Amino acid sequence: MHDMTRRNFFDAAAARARCLQYRKRILDISQQVQALHIGSAYSCTEIVDTIYHGLMRRNLDGTSPDTFLMSKGHGCMILYVILEDMGVLSREDLDLYCKPNGRLGCHPDYGNPGIEASTGALGHGLSMAVGMALAERGHKTSGTIYTVLSDGEVQEGSTWEAVLMASSLGLSNLVAFIDNNDFQSLGRTSETHPTFYPLAEKFQAFGWECAEVDGHDAAAVFAAVSGRQGGRPFMLVGKTTKGKGISYMENVPIWHYRSPSPQEYVQGKQELEAAAVATIGAAS
C-alpha cells in the first residue's frame, strides 16, 4: 500500500468533539476501578489526539509508517480510548481495564494491540524513541517516531542522555512532546524544582528545534509540529492543565491517582456534557 499524504489541515472542531468524548469515556471507566490516573490523562488528551488524528500518516489499509510511544506511561488512559475509537482495542478491552482477565493495566504493556513499548518506569521512553528513530534511518524507511513525556521524567538523567544523543545523531525523524502541566506526582514542578524552567531553551541548548504552545489547543499543536524546519529532532512543550475539562480536578494534585465518587462523577459528566453542547453551538 502507498502511504497517504499527511493532512495539510486540521479540523479543530472535530478535535474538540473527539476530546470531549474521550474525557467522558475515561470518566465512565473511572467508576469501574478503585483508582486511575485521570488527571494525567486529561492533561495530554489534545496532544495525543493530534498525534493520532493529525500528524501520523495512514496507509490505505489503516496501518501507519509512523510510531507512537507513550513515554508518560501513567497517562495511558487517553491512549487506550483513542485506540478503542480507532477499532484497535475493543470496548471489552476498556471495560476490563485493571480487572481480572483483562489485558490493559495502569501502564502500557508491549504486545497489546497498538502498544509499541512497555512504559511507566519514567525516564526510559525517550531513550527507546531515539533507538527507534535511529533504526528507521538505518533501514532507510520513512517512519517518524512520536513520543509524549511528563514533567517528572524530564527530571531523569536518562532523559537528558537521550536528548543529547538524539541531537548528536541528527534524528530529524524524532518528534517529542512534553505534557507540561507543572506537576510531578503530587507537587508543583515550579515549586519543587524551580530551575526546571525555562524549559524550551534547555532543549534548544541541547541542539533540538523546539516550540512552546498551549497544549490544549490542538490546532496550535498541529501547526507547530507541521511547520518545523527539520534537520534536527523536534520538541514541543505543551503548556497544559492537570485534570483539564472538569473544574474540581483542574490543578488539584490529588487527581494524580484517584477515581471520582458517585457524586463527583455526576458533576463531572454534567460539565463535560455542557461543554459538548457549547462546542456544537459554536460550530453551528
Image: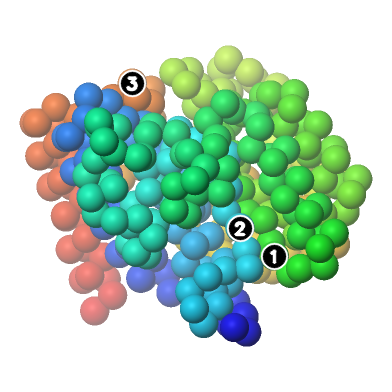
Please tell me in which quadrant of the rendered image residue 157 appears: top right
Residue 241 visible within the image: no
Q: Which residue is mark 2?
A: 67
Task: Indicate which disc residue 254 carries.
Answer: 3
Q: Which residue is mark 1?
A: 143
Tell me the element at label 1. loop
Q: Are marks 1 and 3 in contact (CB under 8 Å)?
A: no
Residue 46 rendering spot, x and y as whole percentages? 44, 54
Which residue appears at 74% of the width and 27% of the height? 158
Q: Earlier in the sequence, mark 1 or mark 3?
A: 1
Left or right of 189 on screen, residue 243: left
Residue 155, relative to residue 68: is it above or below? above
User: As shown in the figure, which amino acid type bears the numbered disc 1?
Assistant: Gly
Measured Cα–Cα span from mark 1 to mark 3: 38 Å
User: As shown in the figure, which amino acid type bears the numbered disc 2?
Assistant: Thr
Q: Are marks 3 and 2 in contact (CB under 8 Å)?
A: no
